[in-house]
Amino acid sequence: MAQRTGSRWIERWEPEDARFWAGGGRAIARRNLIWSIVAENIGFSIWLLWSVVAMKLPKVGFHYTTDQLFQLVALPGLVGCLMRFLYAFAVPRFGGRNWTMVSAALLVVPALSLSVFVSRPDTPYWLMALVVSTAGLGGGNFASSMANISFFYPDREKGFALGLNAAGGNVGVSTVQLLVPIVIGWSWVSLGVLRPGDGIYLANAGLMWLPFIALAVYGAARHMDNLSTARSNLREQLAIVRNKHTWIMAWLYIGTFGSFIGYSAAFPLLLKTQFPEHAGNLAFLGPLVGSLTRPLGGRLADAWGGTRVTLWNFVAMGLATLAVIHFVDSHQFLGFLLMFLVLFVTTGAGNGSTYRMIPAIFRNAKLAEAEGGGPEVREVALKSARTESAAVIGFVSAVGACGGYLVPRGFAASIARTGSTHGALVAFLAFYATCLVLTWRFYARPKPETYRVASLDARV
């Protein structure tokens, strides 16, 4: 059974041991997964707050151009990408529980700063951009959360566990896009009670998350654990950047998660600019279906192999993008909405399957190096694989998050130049083609360059 010290550090953690897993390991992993999801969900909600709030700024007196509004939507994605590089290496240094508490508490900064400055229409654009950038702190949470959970689960269950963890966070995107438009229509009255108002109260968009941030910090402190077996120094973690598979998987993850977070950020403004005649709060549907299909992608990858699912998923992404291009060019709203939802589904499924590939690739690599050695050599190899794959997962998530900036900026540039999203969508389609080629070239063809070991439990 796992041995916990008074500082909430677990000294012994052997998830690959079936007896250890059944004797309490699974229950501990599940408890950490639940509170990881809670904290990550709040992080995603804060990260994508401005996808809704930016759209409302002109209605409360801010005189920003459409390009500036798209820039505000994109900035949290850029900062979140950069923060993920730092957060990815935090878990082995400080512990999963400890860093979850810190990263959740930091979300108070973007929540409070939003509530202050959206009530000041004279705020210069540069200062508002700085305020918006703090929302990127929420984007960093994902990297540390995924790296942490990867340590808790055995290889045979990583796909579903990581998919569930990610989906729980991703749902925060649809939550914020569904609830914030409702909450900003309510005004505060005596004793802090909310009631329907006759205006737009954007400050509520930040204030509403403060109780949930407190809950996430408390839950992490009370119910999560640190793993001593997950500790490693920075030099060991940075070794992953010399492995070509780290960069290949980062490229593929831009195609899946980068598309998901980028489309999620841009979708509200995209609907408003391309189909202004269709009012209604429909933007939340895209992130919702994308989030719900992420565990499915992980589950399918557990059963059929991450490579196979990822390969066909990129085919589906390309076809869905072609359909979106057709409907946006012909200005057919229903077809555009339905096909974009299909595109969101493929981004979610691809998120799950690409993440499932990472532990398998590095596990196979280490076992290939240890082939011919005894059980002790094999065990050392597996431990090294878990450490490396966790670092890669965090690193890949950081690179993939750049889509949160590139996709909205791509749409903004296309609209500014041609008045349509056609050019941006064609560029995205070309990128998906490169992802398809890379998946086939390195992992799916009959003799791929990835590592193979006989009788593996984890499939690439």
Image (tube, grey):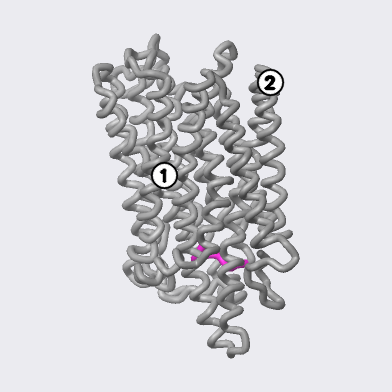
Amino acid beneath label 2: Leu
Q: Main secondary structure of the magenta part?
A: helix
| In the rendered image, the vertical position of residue 207 relative to residue 378, given as above or below | above
The structure residue drawn at horizontal position 32% and vertical position 38%, both measured from the top left corner, is 134
Q: Position of residue 457 (x, y in %)?
A: 67, 71
The structure residue drawn at horizontal position 68% and vertical position 18%, both measured from the top left corner, is 330
| In the rendered image, the vertical position of residue 322 relative to residue 298, given as above or below | above
In primary-sequence order, the first of circles 1 and 2 is: 1
Amino acid beneath label 1: Gly
Magenta stretch: residue 152 in it?
A: yes
Q: Is residue 179 left or right of residue 432?
A: left
Label 1 Cα neighbours within 10 Å, binned few <14 / some 14-19 / many ≥20: many
| In the rendered image, the vertical position of residue 48 relative to residue 36, given as above or below | above
- Foreground residue among 274 and 157: 274
Which stretch did the figure color magenta? 150-155
- Which residue is under mark 2? 334
Magenta stretch: residue 99 in it?
A: no
| In the rendered image, the vertical position of residue 449 relative to residue 284, given as above or below | below
Q: Is residue 345 left or right of residue 91?
A: right
The structure residue drawn at horizontal position 35% and vertical position 55%, both measured from the top left corner, is 86
- Which residue is under mark 1? 139
- Foreground residue among 129 and 450: 450
Q: Farthest residue toward the right?
A: 446
Is residue 52 something that shows in the picture? yes
Q: Position of residue 227 (x, y in %)?
A: 42, 68
The Cα–Cα distance between marks 1 and 2, rounded to whole angstroms, is 31 Å
- Foreground residue among 172 and 426: 426
